[in-house]
Image (cartoon, rainbow, N blue to C red):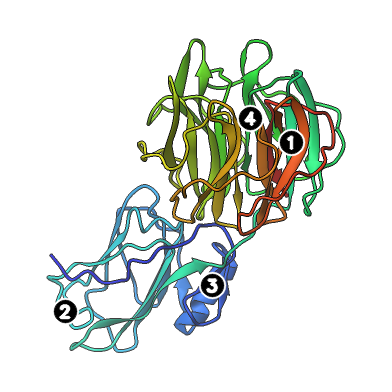
Amino acid sequence: MSGIVGSKLNIRGSGRIAKLGTDGQVLTSAGAGLQANYEDAAGGGLDWQAIETGSTMTAVAGEGYWIDTTSNACTITLPASASNGDEIMFADYARTWGTYGIVIDSNGLNYQGDDDSFDVEYGTDGQALHIVYSGATKGWIPTLDKTVDDVPSTGNDNGIFGFGIDITAVTNLVSNVGVVATDTTGVGTARYYLAACEFGGDKGIFAYGSTGSLSSLSNLVSNAGVVATDTAGVGTARNDGVGACEYGGDKGIFGYGYAVGTSVSMTNLVSSSGVVSADVTGVGTARDGTAACEYGTGLGIFGYGSSGGRVSITNLVSNVGVVSTDVTGVGTAHNLLSACGYGNDKGIFGYGYTGSVTAITNLVSNVGVVSTDTTGVGTARRYLASCEYGGDKGIFGYGLNGALSISNLVSNAGVVATDVTGVGTARYGLAACSYN
């Protein structure tokens, strides 16, 4: 069969405010608001059905269908007979048609002038398809074949630095203009060489590290920056350069690090409600001293670290939390660095250790391409932390070159500023994440 129809477009993200094509209508990602706007775009009057999750279904004229292909593709059989003006609408309920698409079986009638010996396939995340029967010659014709493109969204406004050496649990909040607050009394078990990332779109989590022995404890951070008491550890206890970042818009991933006697590559996913999963078998070179950040929409990247020697390799993270094999490194190999997002869809790796402390940075594009070295700004150091703030900016803070509390702001164009005088307890081996 041949005759594939429907554009293959890159769709940015999921679960955020979105707009439909170029008609100016603003849609939400699910629910009655999106249904109402789809009906407006289709001329109204459709009878929307329950969410369809099966691998096959038969459509009826005058109805609209949410097609959920999270687990499988769906073959849709159109009515065997139709009258001029009959209409049907289909919408990608879970934004998964790019993974599992839909196939239209025109069931003896023509589709855009082709007979039903042609398979008609749609495979773009977020697609909306409205078809109207025009008569025997052309048959069913799409009057709407659009994708729901995400309006660029901003990240979290606030950040939090937490834990670190000298084995402390103190935290320091970061305002939406990048001002670091004085110490907040620590909550949970004091530890160091841990990692942190976002989850749930507006919350964070600290996890892993060392209390003097390796740990897998975690502590959730509310959307007001309040750290919770310890959650029992899940997965392999480890420390020393575990990387962590957000993916999928509302989930997180911890990966790599140093377990008993060896560098590791396993990962642990964090659900949208902050639940850490058991170990996922590692992909790529096992290493410690690595860092991770978000890029694009719903994507992540682990980079650099040490595996017997310092490396510059990276591993991309898909929007469903799948880690890719090694990508050849760019820039100076270093470890004990940090990374964060900036500019809504880009990232930055910075600072660390090359054999001596450094302040070099490497920008990450919105398609996950790492740039060559940018000359360092500010005090060279290692064992620091970083996070987003202000929706589209970043901050590096604290670290070791002698214990420090200084910070360096990152603009929404990825430019690192000179040192800002430190606030709070000077320390290193800490972690940071954003919240809203």
Give above or below for 8 relative to 388.
below
What residue did someone put label 1 on? 161
Give the residue type at disc 4: Arg
Q: Look at the numbered disc 3 and give the secondary structure of its residue.
A: strand
Q: Are marks 2 and 4 in contact (CB under 8 Å)?
A: no
Q: In the figure, is residue 331 to the left or right of 293?
A: left
Q: In the figure, is residue 151 to the left or right of 402?
A: left
- Any mark on residue 19, and which? 3
Q: Nearer the viewer, residue 229 or 311?
A: 311
Residue under the point 68% across and 14% down: 211
Q: Are marks 1 and 3 in contact (CB under 8 Å)?
A: no
Q: Look at the numbered disc 1 and give the secondary structure of its residue.
A: strand
| Number of residues whose C-alpha sits closer than 10 Å to that of mark 4, classed few (under 14), some (14–19) or many (20 or more) | many
What residue did someone put label 4 on? 382
Q: Nearer the viewer, residue 396 or 273?
A: 396
Give above or below for 429 relative to 411.
above
What residue did someone put label 2 on? 114
